[in-house]
Image (spheres, helix red, strand yellow):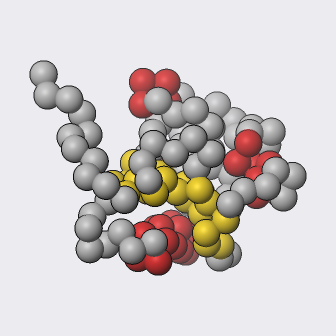
């Protein structure tokens, strides 16, 4: 299945290299479906990235081509990471950027988990 408008997966992106062990990360979680690690430029006291282990460019790519097991395993992993980090009670934000207008910097689907303080509005009013 192809997802229109998406480039082919780039095996040289930084997350692919992290998954292959070529670049170190500050890992907080790993299972067969996902890897979670601290962002190198945190935007909140807790800022963790959760990436699937498959070759997916974006959420659209992952949701169209990922198996049911991959999708469920990935999102369950993200929930487990949030619980393990103690984010459930005070609250947190989950963010996925897609494409240029969405601010996606790495062409490998990933979730950002932000927490550790009040995060305010996600998008300014107006």
User: Which residue is rendered at x = 49% and y = 24% of the image?
Assistant: 100
Instruction: Estimate the x, y position of residue 108 in percent, counting from the top left.
Output: 62, 44
Viewer-nearest residue: 123 or 65: 123
As drawn, 54 above or below 5: below
Residue furthest left as drawn: 126
Residue 49 in the figure: left or right of residue 16: left
Residue furthest right as drawn: 22
Instruction: Estimate the x, y position of residue 9 in percent, counting from the top left.
Output: 70, 40
Viewer-nearest residue: 61 or 105: 105
Q: Quadrant of the C terminus?
A: top left
**How many marks overall?**
0
Q: Is residue 1 visible?
A: no
User: Which residue is rendered at x = 47% and y = 77% of the image?
Assistant: 84
Instruction: Estimate the x, y position of residue 91 in percent, counting from the top left.
Output: 27, 64
User: Which residue is rendered at x = 42% and y = 24% of the image?
Assistant: 101
Which quadrant would residue 121 be assigned to in this image?
A: top left
Which quadrant would residue 102 be assigned to in this image?
A: top left
Residue 65 in the figure: left or right of residue 20: left
Instruction: Estimate the x, y position of residue 79 in percent, counting from the top left.
Output: 42, 72
Q: Is residue 48 visible?
A: yes
User: Which residue is rendered at x = 47% and y = 36% of the image?
Assistant: 98
As drawn, 56 above or below 121: below
Which quadrant would residue 113 be assigned to in this image?
A: bottom left
As drawn, 80 above or below 35: below
As drawn, 100 above or below 10: above
Residue 84 in the figure: left or right of residue 18: left
């Amino acid at each position: 299945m192809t997802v229109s408008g998406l480039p082919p997966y780039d095996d040289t992106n930084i997350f692919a290299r992290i998954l292959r062990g070529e670049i170190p990360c500050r890992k907080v979680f790993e299972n067969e479906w996902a890897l979670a690690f601290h962002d190198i430029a945190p935007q909140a006291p807790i800022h963790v990235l959760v990436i699937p282990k498959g070759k997916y460019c974006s959420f659209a790519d992952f949701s169209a081509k990922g198996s049911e097991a991959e999708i469920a395993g990935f999102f369950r992993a993200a929930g487990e990471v949030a619980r393990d980090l103690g984010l459930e009670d005070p609250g947190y934000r989950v963010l996925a950027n897609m494409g240029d207008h969405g601010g996606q910097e790495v062409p490998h689907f990933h979730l950002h988990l932000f927490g550790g303080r009040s995060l305010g509005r996600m998008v300014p009013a107006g």
